[in-house]
Image (tube, rainbow, N blue to C red):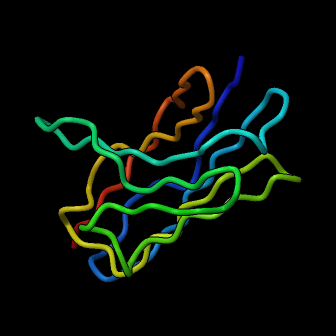
Amino acid sequence: QVQLVESGGGLVQPGGSLRLSCAASGRVFSVYTMGWYRQAPGKQRELVAEITSAGSTNYADSVKGRFTISRDNAKTTVYLQMNSLKPEDTAVYYCSARFVNFYWGQGTQVTVSS
């Protein structure tokens, strides 16, 4: 069983930055593929970025060059650095962990607005 707790969301102006964190409990964090998804009102949940146990990363086209996912296995934490934020980035952001099973965090709201 893995428990995921996100933090770092909030309100930011267009062009601003935020860093999301996701602290994971449970054993063997390093083997999990960790990811960030988001869901905007009226839309389906979509993958934003993911990072494998080997450190390989994958990004949605809409965030390439603006967002960076990273992980600290010693701290069992995954991060999402979000720069040059746009209003269309507004959503609830969810952390995920995938190995044999798939786990979700509770989500953190990110609002990009002037």
Residue 70 occupies quadrant? bottom right
- Farthest residue, direction left: 42
Q: Residue at x 59, y 35 (%)?
A: 97
Q: Residue furthest top?
A: 1
Quick check: 36 left or right of 66? right
Q: Position of residue 37 (x, y in %)?
A: 39, 45
Look at 24% across and 67% down and name the residue there: 62
Judge left or right: residue 42 versus residue 76: left
Q: Nearer the viewer, residue 109 or 98?
A: 98
* Quarter of the image that includes the C terminus: bottom left
- In this rendering, would 114 be left or right of 15? left
Residue 17 percent across, percent down from the top left: 45, 76
Q: Quadrant of residue 6?
A: top right
Instruction: Judge by depth and name the residue closer to the eye, 39 or 54.
Output: 54
Residue depicted at x 21% and y 44%: 40
The N terminus: image quadrant: top right
Q: Count of labels shown? A: 0
Pinpoint residue 35: horizontal percent, then vertical percent: 51, 47
Residue at 58% across, 20% down? 101
